[in-house]
Amino acid sequence: MKTLVCAALSCALLLTPALAAEPESGVSSQAPTGTASYQLPEQLGWIYRWGTASELSGDSVLLHAGGETEQDILYHISDQTVILNAVTGESMTADQLRDGESLYIYSTPVMTLSEPAQAGATLILASIPADYGVPMARRVTSVTRDGDSVSIGTEDLVYHLSDETKVSGLSLDELIPGDYVVGWYDMVAESYPAQTTPETLVLLDGGNAGWIHADLQSVSLNGAELELSEQELPQLQEGKLMLPVRAVAEELGCTVSWDVQSPDQVTVSQDGQTLYTLALDGEEAYAASGVSFAPVEQILGVHNLYFVP
């Protein structure tokens, strides 16, 4: 189970295979029309590379990059690494990987500057036939339940589950925005966003403790809107969305303290352990009308949250 860390289908159908993934990068865009303009936080997601496997050891694989400008990368395989058959979606083990086969490997953006560069493998898609459209790992932006019906939204595709959809990995009850899905399907509805009913769906943990939505009128944590006073409503500072520290932290089970001897800072702790201290110097965090505010990016980072626009 996840735990919080102080945390109209279109009638036109296209017959398309699941296509190879594009690397996900942080997105910075404007808020919807009708609200004050602010930058949405940049959030780096998983990135993927494809290439040829070599030097397999059971706990690592050297990937010879498929692109001319890509470098070779040594990926470390752990108990948390998910390995899937790219055709069936079935689970595989590291000892089933073969030297010389093509692989698609996903990882977080964190990578060493060594030679070769090294990273932790999050997802490996293997046993790929020639000229096969490898399914894409997409980040979840919404999970909608209507009775027995479940729809999973991503940035560019909505998955509508049916009674025949084979689901593995996380349970549907565990899936939250910020997690990932890999889907196998035959038809895509030509709509915006595109929609499909997958035959197989693998649900993967994105590593976030929870998710948050905020604008200048409200803040919601894991789908529940916080009760905020007028003074606690999010603010705008130089284009940045600022969130009320105490309201968010306390909702996540943390304690926020302020010492009269140090009036220019607040401390956030959990179970008696200090998590972080904010300097209310106006450069980043600040106090207004007795309420401490910090940039949304900072709140996301310290509480390991995924932001849903």
Image: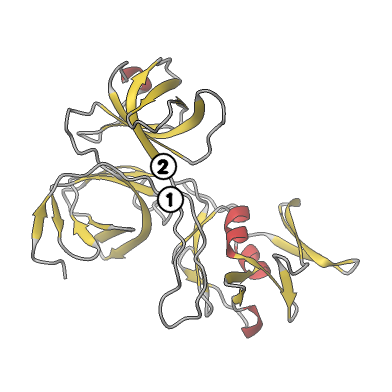
> Does 78 sit above or below residue 276?
above
Q: Position of residue 7 (x, y in %)?
A: 58, 56
Q: Position of residue 42 (x, y in %)?
A: 50, 57
Dot label at residue 163: none
> Does 132 sit above or below residue 74?
below
Q: Earlier in the sequence, mark 1 or mark 2?
A: 1
Q: Is residue 159 left or right of residue 62?
A: left
> Does 116 sit above or below residue 43?
above
Which of these two is toward me, 125 or 93? 125
Amino acid under disc 2: Ile
For image coordinates 22% across by 29% down, the residue present is 128
Q: Quadrant of residue 294?
A: bottom right
Disc 1 to disc 2: CB gap under 8 Å? yes
Mark 1 sits on what residue? 25
Q: Position of residue 201 (x, y in %)?
A: 26, 45
Which of these two is toward me, 120 or 69? 69
Dot label at residue 47: 2
Q: Quadrant of residue 251?
A: bottom right
Q: Residues within 10 Å of mark 2 (few under 14, many from 20)?
A: some
Q: Can you say which quadrant of the picture contains the C terminus?
A: bottom left
Q: Position of residue 278 (x, y in %)?
A: 74, 61
Amino acid under disc 1: Ser
